Each structure stands twice: as C-alpha cells, then as structure tokens.
Image: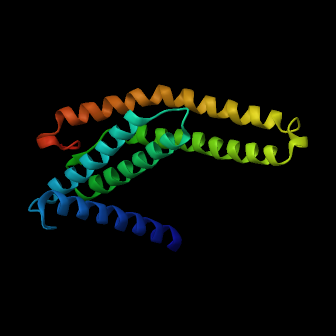
C-alpha cells in the first residue's frame, strides 16, 4: 500500500519535473497561463521522443530497442498524468503503448539473458554443448517477441501520426 503510493508519487514528481523543464525551455518561465497547454506540450515532447526512437530502431541492436521502450514508458506516464489532470486531454494510444512496452520488455529480458549465457559459455567452454538448448530457447523467445512487436508498431506509428495531424498548434495530444 504505502510502498506503491511512494512509487506513484515518485513517478508523478519525475514527470512534473520534466514538464517544468519543458516549459522553461519553451517559454523562458515556469508560469504558463493555460495548464492544458503545458500538459499538451509535455505530451508532444514525449511523443517526439518516441518518434525519433522509432526512426533509430534496429532490431539487431538491443540498445535501440531498450531506448525505444524507455521513451514509450515516459510517453505513457506523461499521457496518464495529463489525462488525469486535464480531462479534456485525450490520447487514444494507451493500450498500444502498454502492449509495446510489455513486448519490448520481453525482448530486453531475452537480450540480457542471452548476453549473460554467452559470457558464461565463453568463460567455461566445456559447457558450450550443455547450454545450446537454452541459448536456442532464448533466441526463439526473442524472435517471437519481435514478431509481436512488428505487428504492434504500425498501430503506434499510426496513432502518433493521427494525433499529430489533429492537434492544435503542434501538440500531439488534443483537447476533446
């Protein structure tokens, strides 16, 4: 109970700090006249980060997938807070974001585990044959997660493009 509350508050504080920094960067002072514009700007900045990570994504380079996952996570958190604080703010991509974050997490887990097994095998060459089945299983799971990812990414790209096209003054989220 209390632990969960502290985590949520820490997440909210982190997002609030990011929003404040964005306002200072864009307006020169942390006092916007319209809180909804502030929230839309934060959502827009986070969506821009996701779009740039999507453009840099390379499934053969685990680091690019991990950075995309972090960008999606930040975007999702900012959207959740923006929608909670300003009911007129709405981003319809939440289920897609959760799904992608979960899939990318599975790929990341497989990448980390695969790298650890590879290091272990390289240090103890006599176990190479014993661990072949485990390495194959890890690679199979990673490939399965990537297939799911490739089916979900177009939905995210579509949602980001659609939101950007409908948004007033460049903000990705739109007021209802």
Residue 34 is situated, as x and y percent measured from the top left of the image, at: 11, 59
Residue 62 is situated, as x and y percent measured from the top left of the image, at: 55, 40
Where 67 falls versus 9 (above or below)?
A: above
Q: Nearer the viewer, residue 129 or 71?
A: 129
Where 69 falls versus 21 (above or below)?
A: above
Residue 32 is situated, as x and y percent measured from the top left of the image, at: 12, 63
Residue drawn at (71%, 36%), measured in percent from left and top?
138
Q: Residue furthest left?
A: 33
Q: Residue furthest bottom?
A: 2
Q: Is residue 84 left or right of residue 150?
A: left
Q: Quadrant of the C terminus?
A: top left
Residue drawn at (18%, 63%), measured in percent from left and top?
24
Total label count?
0
Q: Is residue 7 left or right of residue 159?
A: right
Q: Is residue 126 left or right of residue 93?
A: right
Residue 77: in sight, yes or no?
A: yes
Residue 110 is situated, as x and y percent measured from the top left of the image, at: 65, 41
Q: How is the image coloured?
A: rainbow
Q: Is residue 136 left or right of residue 60?
A: right
Q: Residue furthest right?
A: 126
Residue 93: in sight, yes or no?
A: no
Residue 155, image quadrant: top left
Residue drawn at (17%, 34%), measured in percent from left and top?
166
Residue drawn at (23%, 58%), measured in percent from left and top?
22
């Amino acid at each position: 109970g209390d632990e969960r509350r502290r985590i949520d508050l820490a997440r909210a504080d982190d997002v609030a700090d990011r929003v404040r920094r964005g306002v200072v960067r864009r307006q020169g002072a942390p006092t916007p006249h319209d809180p909804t514009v502030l929230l839309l700007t934060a959502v827009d900045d986070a969506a821009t980060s996701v779009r740039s990570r999507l453009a840099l994504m390379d499934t053969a380079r685990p680091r690019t997938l991990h950075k995309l996952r972090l960008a999606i996570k930040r975007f999702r958190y900012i959207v959740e807070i923006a929608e909670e604080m300003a009911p007129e703010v709405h981003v319809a991509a939440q289920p897609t974001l959760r799904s992608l974050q979960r899939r990318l997490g599975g790929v990341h887990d497989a990448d980390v585990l695969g790298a650890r097994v590879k290091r272990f095998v390289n240090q103890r060459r006599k176990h190479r044959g014993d661990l072949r089945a485990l390495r194959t299983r890890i690679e199979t799971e990673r490939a399965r997660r990537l297939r799911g990812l490739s089916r979900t990414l177009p939905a995210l790209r579509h949602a980001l493009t659609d939101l950007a096209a409908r948004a007033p003054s460049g903000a990705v989220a739109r007021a209802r």
